[in-house]
Image: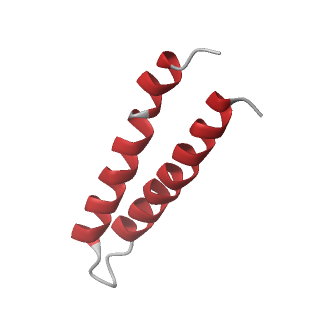
Amino acid sequence: MKKRDLITMFLCVPGAGLFALGTGMCMTMLWGMLVPGVAVGFAGIVLLLCLIPLCRGIKE
C-alpha cells in the first residue's frame, strides 16, 4: 500500500463518517439535535476538504 493511499484512507473514513452523522442529526428534528448536527457535519466537510490539497501534495 502506498503512503498516499494510507493517508487518504485515514482521513476519508472519519471525514465521511462525521459528514454522514452530522447530516443524520440535522434531519432528526424530533430529537432536537439540529445544532450539534450542523457542527459535526461541518467538521466532516472540513476534514474532507483537507483531502484535496493533501492528495495533490503527496508525491510517490
Q: Where residue 55 appears, x then y in whole percent?
A: 52, 24
- In the figure, is residue 46 to the left or right of 11? left
Q: Where residue 5 appears, x then y in whole percent?
A: 67, 33
Residue drawn 47% across the image and 32% down it: 51
Question: How are the colours assigned in the image?
Answer: secondary structure
- Residue 38, placed above or below residue 28: above
**Quadrant of the drawing holding the N terminus:** top right
> Which one is in front, 53 or 35?
53
Residue drawn 46% across the image and 65% down it: 21
Q: Where residue 17 appears, x then y in whole percent?
A: 52, 58
- In the figure, is residue 45 to the left or right of 13? left
**Quadrant of the drawing holding the C terminus:** top right
Q: Where residue 53 appears, x then y in whole percent?
A: 42, 22
Task: Please tell me in which quadrant of the rendered image residue 35 appears.
Answer: bottom left
- In the figure, is residue 49 to the left or right of 9? left
- Residue 54, placed above or below residue 40: above
- In the figure, is residue 11 to the left or right of 33? right
Instruction: Check the image and name the residue furthest to the left.
Output: 35
Residue drawn 52% across the image and 51% down it: 16
